Amino acid sequence: MNIPAQLVIGSHIYNNLLEQEKVKFKLYKKYNNLNISEWLGDNYFYDEEDLLTFWGVKKLKDINGCVYVRRFDNLSRKDEKFWRSLSLNGDQIKIYWC
């Protein structure tokens, strides 16, 4: 059974990957200097709270990095566990099961 998914990672995880893994990801967006009063979300983050949780910070202005996306035709639970192990405190990683 194939379980398609999108893996969304932040700069910390991406920068620690080997080059042959980095080429499998696409840059989605650079987040920095977010000094807006209310952030309303985008394709991967529902709202300001979701974005802050992803980055592991308390204020939008503290976000400084890029988000990368990789699509999988079949992401196993073993693969999920591996990718989650690369994050610090569960930050900078999201998986969208398709």
Image (cartoon, grey):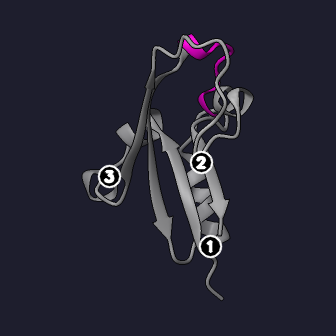
Residue 20: mark in rendering: none
Q: Nearer the viewer, residue 91 or 69?
A: 69
Q: Nearer the viewer, residue 45 or 55?
A: 45
CA separation, marks 3 and 1?
A: 20 Å
Q: In the rendered structure, which amino acid carries the disc numbered 1? A: Ser
Q: Nearer the viewer, mark 1 or mark 2?
A: 1
Task: Tell me the residue that label 2 is attached to.
Answer: 85
Q: Nearer the viewer, mark 3 or mark 2?
A: 3
Give the magenta-colored segment's residue range.
Answer: 54-61
Per the image, label 2 sits on a secondary structure element best described as helix
Give whichever of discs 1 and 2 has the lower sequence position: 1
Task: Tell me the residue that label 3 is attached to.
Answer: 22
CA separation, marks 1 and 2?
A: 14 Å
Q: Position of residue 62 (x, y in %)?
A: 55, 13
Question: Residue sitting at 64 percent across and 19 percent down?
Answer: 57
Per the image, label 1 sits on a secondary structure element best described as loop
Q: Residues within 10 Å of mark 2 (few under 14, many from 20)?
A: few
Residue 78's place in the image compared with 37, above or below, is below
Q: Nearer the viewer, residue 66 or 1?
A: 66
Task: Tell me the residue that label 1 is attached to.
Answer: 76
Marks 2 and 1: in contact by CB < 8 Å? no
Question: Residue sitting at 58 percent across and 13 percent down?
Answer: 36
CA separation, marks 3 and 2?
A: 17 Å
Residue 66's place in the image compared with 76, above or below, is above
